[in-house]
Amino acid sequence: MVILLLLGIFVGLPAAEILTFVEVGSHIGGLATVATTVGTALAGMILFRVQGFHIVKRARQTLDSGSMPFQDILDGLGLLSAGLLLFLPGFITDIAGFLLFIPPLRIYLLAIALQGFLRRDHVSSTGGPRGDHWSTSVIDSDYENVSDRPDDPVRITDNNPDDPKTPENRL
């Protein structure tokens, strides 16, 4: 299943983007197609900056109130994904990127993705992949407090110059 998904992303998506470039280029021309691609990348950068500042401001307010900004972190992750999709050349990724710039849709899609990730059978709270337990080591030892030995030639203290036990005053 994962192999098919990766194959679709790394082979199918570029092939679909090339086909879309050819179709759009045949309708509006090559120069207009390239200009549109560059324009969507610039629009994505502007949207990313505007919405990114808003998310950072909201996250700071949430932190100042003493809460963890989990929703803001997820929202920022979705915004980063939207910016990356718009930065990639292609019309299919541009459409997906612009859809992710719609905040309610972005949060909804991230919630679905997070639920799918948490339901996967390879994620386990008991250890490694598919429930395997990772080995742990226990170190068993004894200790002895040596800081109060009277015969200790050098004793770490708070370096009080009037303390007769400091190394400087022992000599």
Image (spheres, grey):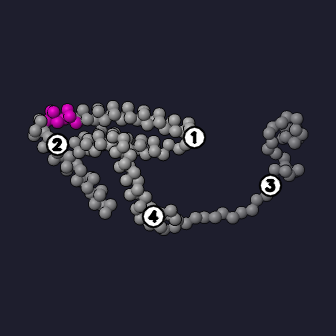
Q: How many marks?
A: 4
Badge 2 or badge 4: first in the primary sequence: 2
Q: Secondary structure at mark 1?
A: loop
Report if residue 117 lies within the magenta region.
no
Badge 3 or badge 4: first in the primary sequence: 4
Return the residue found at the far bottom.
132
Badge 3 or badge 2: first in the primary sequence: 2
Residue indicated by mark 4: 129
Quadrant assignment for the N terminus: bottom left
x, y percent for residue 144? 79, 58
Residue indicated by mark 2: 21
Whether residue 161 is visible, yes or no, is yes
Residue at 89%, 40% in the rendered image? 164
Residue indicated by mark 1: 66
Please indicate whether residue 107 sits to the left or right of residue 33 in the image: right
Whether residue 81 is visible, yes or no, is no
Query: Which range is magenta?
Result: 30-37
Using a 10 Å C-alpha cutoff, classify the residue at mark 3 as few (fewer than 14 neighbours), some (14 to 19) or many (20 or more).
Answer: few
Label number found at residue 145? 3
Identity, as a three-letter code, of the amino acid under mark 1: Gly
